[in-house]
Image: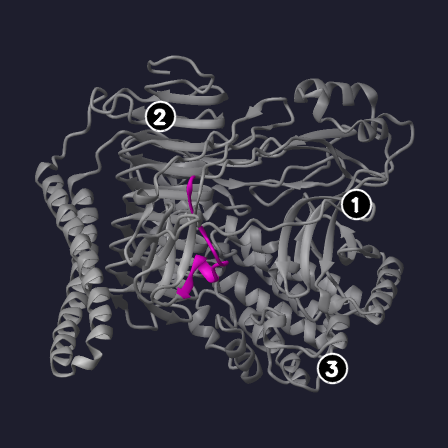
Amino acid sequence: MNTLAAPQHPQRLGAYRVNSLLGNGPLGQVFLGVDTRNQRPVALRLFTPGFDSDDFVEALGGLVDQLRQLDDPLVVPLLEVERVSEGFYVAMDFLPGGDLQSLLRRQGGVMELTQAMTVISQAAKAVHAAAGAGIFHADLKPGSLLLDLDGRVHVGNAGIFPLAMQVRRLRATDRSWAYTAPELASTDFTVDARTDMFGLGAILFRLLSGTQLFSASDPHQAMQDVRACRLPDLKKVLPQVPDEVRDCIARCCARRPDDRYPSLRSLLDALEQITDTLLGQRRAGAAIEALDGLLADRRALRAALEPAQLRRLSRMVQVVDHGLKAVLRLAPGASFKRQLLEVILAEAGIRYGIDEAALNEATRSSETVRLLVVARGEAPTPARPGRDVRGDAMAPLMQSVQLRISDDGLQALALVRPGRKVQGDELDAALAEAKLNQSSINTDVLVQLRSARGLNQECLVLATGRAPKPGQDAGWRLLEQSGDGGLRRVRRGDRIACWTLARPGIDGIDVHGLVLPAAQPRQAQPEDLLGVGVELRQDQGEPLLLASQQGGVIRRADGVVEVQPIHDVEGDVDASRPPVESDEMVVVHGSVRNGGIVQSAQNVVILGDVEGGEISAGGDIVISGEFSGGGGQVCAGGGVQAGSVAGRRLIASSLQVSGVLHAACVHVAGDVRARAIVGGEVVCGGSIEVEELGDADGATTIARCGTHLQLSERQLVARLRWQKISADRRRLLARRDDLLADQHALELRSMRHRSVSVSCAEALAIMQQEIAIIDQSLSGIREQSDSLRHEVMEQVESMASVDEVRGQAHVLARHLAYPGVQVSIADGEAEELKRRRRQYRLGFGPTPDGGGDGLS
C-alpha cells in the first residue's frame, strides 16, 4: 500500500480535547473534539498561519455574536474563538449525522429527485435565515451541509469565508471551485444572497447528475471555468428530471447575478412549488414516471406485468425493524434487471434511504441464498423524530436516554432530550444492556446524566475506547515526502529511500473492554522489496540506501519500491475522451467516470475517484479516492488498492481496502485485506483479513478463501501479468541496445584519442556495470515468464481441496463477525453465522488467542 506520513494534530485546543481529524482544507484543519467542561462533542477548526491576523480574529468574534443572536436551528452556531500556541481556532457544534458528501457516497453518488429537493429546500431555508442577519456563506458545497441524527440538513461555516477573503486576496488554490459563483473568481467582487443561490443550484445539479458543475482537477483551470460559467446542456445531462427543476438549476447558476432569482425568498417559493407538484404526482400514482430516468422502460415493464404478478414480486421486499430496513431475499441463482427492481421497490412503497450498492448487488446472480438490505431509514432518538424507508416520519423515542455504540466499538454516545431529566431506571437499563467497560466510561458525563436537572444538549460522549496502533513493517522509508498518490519524480542516481526495521504495534481496547489486536508488522529482507529501476547502495558507515537507476517516478506498492516512467493524463477520463492506452505507468490527475477506459501494461494510479468506467493494468491499480458505481470491469495483473469499494466487480491478484468493501463482487487470486466487508461476495485464493465481517443488519456477506478462480478469470489475470512482463522486457532490451551503441562509440573514440582514454575507461566501466544489472533483470524476467507459463499450463477449473490449502488460507475478523455471514474454505462446507462472533477465525493454524493448530 502507499505509505504517507500520518497527520499530526494537537492533543488539546484550549478547553477542548482533540480526538481525531475530520478534514483538511485551504483555511485549515477541522478536528472532532470534546469540551472538557461539559463533555459536549464539538468540531474545531484550526486556521492556517495565513489567517491569524488580529483583524480576522476580531471579525470572527463578531461573527460568533451574530450567529448567537440569529439562533436558527438550521444554521450551525460558532461557540467561541481563541488563540493558542498552535495558532487560533473556532469551536462549533458537532452534528453526528456527517455531511452531505458522505451521504452521497453511501447512496452511490446520486439522489432520487424528491430527496434531493428536500435537501436543497432545507439548505435554502438555512441560507435565507442567515442572509436575513447579513451573514453570507460564499463557500457552499456538499461538505458544508451537515446532517443531524434524523437527517435534517444544517448549514455549517456560515460567514467564515467572506471574512477570510477580506484578509488576503483569493488564490486559485484557496478553495474548491466546483460550486463557486463566477463573481468570486474576479478581482472585484461582492458577496450577497445571490452568491449563495448559485452554490445551492450547483449542489442540486451534483445531487441529481452525480457530477460536479466545474470538474477540472487543476485549480487554475477550474478558476477559469468558473469565470466563463458555461453550463452543460441540462436536458442532455438530466433527461429524467422535470423541466421545472432544470429551469431552477439554470436560473440559480446564471452567470450574471441579476439573471438569478431576485431573492432567496423567491427561490424558496419556487422550490416549494416544485416539491408540491412532485408530491401531487406521487399521490396520483405517477411518481415512477416523474422520478426515474428510464421512463419508457419502466412503463413497459409495468405494462408487461400482471397486477397480481407485480404484487407477488413486491412482497419479496420485506420491511422490518419497525420500518427502518427494507430487505430483499434472493434464492440461489436469482437476480433482477435494475429497471425491474426499481419498479418492485416503487410498488412496495420504498422510497427513502435506498442503497445503490445493494441494488447493483441484486443485479448479479450467486450460488447461495442472499439477504440484501436495499434501504435503511433514520432511527429516531429521544430528541429527534426518525424516518422509515417509506419516507414517513417516526415519533421521537419516549425513553429519556438511549445509548448508541459506534460501528468500530470505540465510542458510546448518550442521546437525550434537552431540558428533560434522564430517568435513573432507564439509564441503568441502558448501561446494563450496553455492557460498557467501567474504565472506558467518562465519570463526569455519567454524573451529568444522573443529575436532577435536565441537560441542554442532546448528544454526549459517555465512553471512549482506544484504537489499535498498527506496527511498522520492515521496509524502505522514503527520504522525501511523496506527492499526490504517493508519487515523486526523481532523476537517475538519486537516493530515494533507507531501510528501517520492523516495530511492533500496540493493541487497542473497545468500550466493552474487548482487546482490539494491532496488525502485526511484516518482516522482510531488503532484497525482497526491490522493484524495477532501483538498486541497493551502502557507503561505509551509512545505513542501507536505495537509489534510482533511471528517471521517472517512485512508486511503493506492498512495500516494494520501484522507479517507473510515467504517462500523465490531466483531468477526468469519461465517455467524451478516447481510451487511455500505454505501456508506461498511467497517472490520471482526475477521476474515471462512466464510459471512461484506462489500459496500461504497467500500474494505473487514479488521483481522484472511480465512478464507473473500465480499468485494466498489467501491474497494480491504485485509487486515491472513492471506488463506486456500476460501469465496466476492473482487472489487474497485480493488486488493487483503494480507500473504499462499493458495488463494483473486480478481478485481481490481491486487494487492499483501507475502508469498507460494500456490496462488491470481488474475485482475487491472492489475499484480501480490508477494514470491513459488508454484503456482496469475496472469493480469493489466499486469505481474508478484516476488522469486521458483515453488519448488524444481517446483510448476506459471502467470504470464500483458498478457492481457485474460474479458468477464464485466472487466464485474464495471467494475460495482464504477461503484458507487464513483456513491457518490462521491451524497455530493458531497448535500454541495453542504447548502452551497447554508446559503448561501441566510446571505444572508437578512445582508440582515436588516446589522451581521453582514462575518462573513457571510467565511462565504459559505468556502462558495463549498468549492462550487467540489466542482464540480471532480464534473467529475472525470464524466470517470471517461465513461472507464469507453468501456472497457465497447470490451470484447471476444479476447486482447491481443504488439504491443498492447509495452513495457507483463513478468514479472520479481528473485531466482529455478524449474523448473515457465510464463510467457506476451498471445497469445505460453508458456515453461516447465526450470532455475533468476536475475533472470529476460520482456517488452519493458530487461533487469535494463541491456541494450537486445527480448524478453528
x and y percentages locating residue 687 in the rendered image: 33, 31
Residue wearing tag 2: 823
> Who's the residue at 29% across and 35% down the image?
684
Q: Please state if 265 lies on the left or on the right of 151 as rendered.
A: right
x and y percentages locating residue 274 in the rendered image: 61, 65
Number of numbered discs visible in the structure rendering: 3
The answer to whether residue 595 is visible is no
Query: Which secondary structure, mark 2?
Result: strand
User: In this orientation, which residue lies closer to the viewer: 275 or 646?
Assistant: 646
Say which label, 2 or 3, has the lower sequence index: 3
Q: Callout 2: 10 Å neighbours few (<14), some, many (20+)?
A: many
Q: Which mark is residue 296?
A: none
Say which label, 3 or 1, has the lower sequence index: 1
Query: Which secondary structure, mark 3?
Result: loop
> Who's the residue at 28% across and 48% down the image?
638
Give the residue type that dot 2 points to: Val
Give the residue type that dot 1 points to: Tyr
Of all residues, the one furthest to the left in this rendering is 793
Residue wearing tag 3: 190
Residues under labels 2 and 3: Cα distance?
A: 61 Å
Residue wearing tag 1: 16
Over which residues does the magenta segment extend? 474-489
User: Can you tell which quarter of the image residue 578 is in?
Assistant: bottom left
The answer to whether residue 186 is visible is yes
Which of label 2 and label 1 is nearer to you?
1
Query: Which secondary structure, mark 1?
Result: strand
> Who's the residue at 27% across and 51% down the image?
635
The C terminus: image quadrant: top left
- In the displayed structure, 617 sits above or below 851; it is below
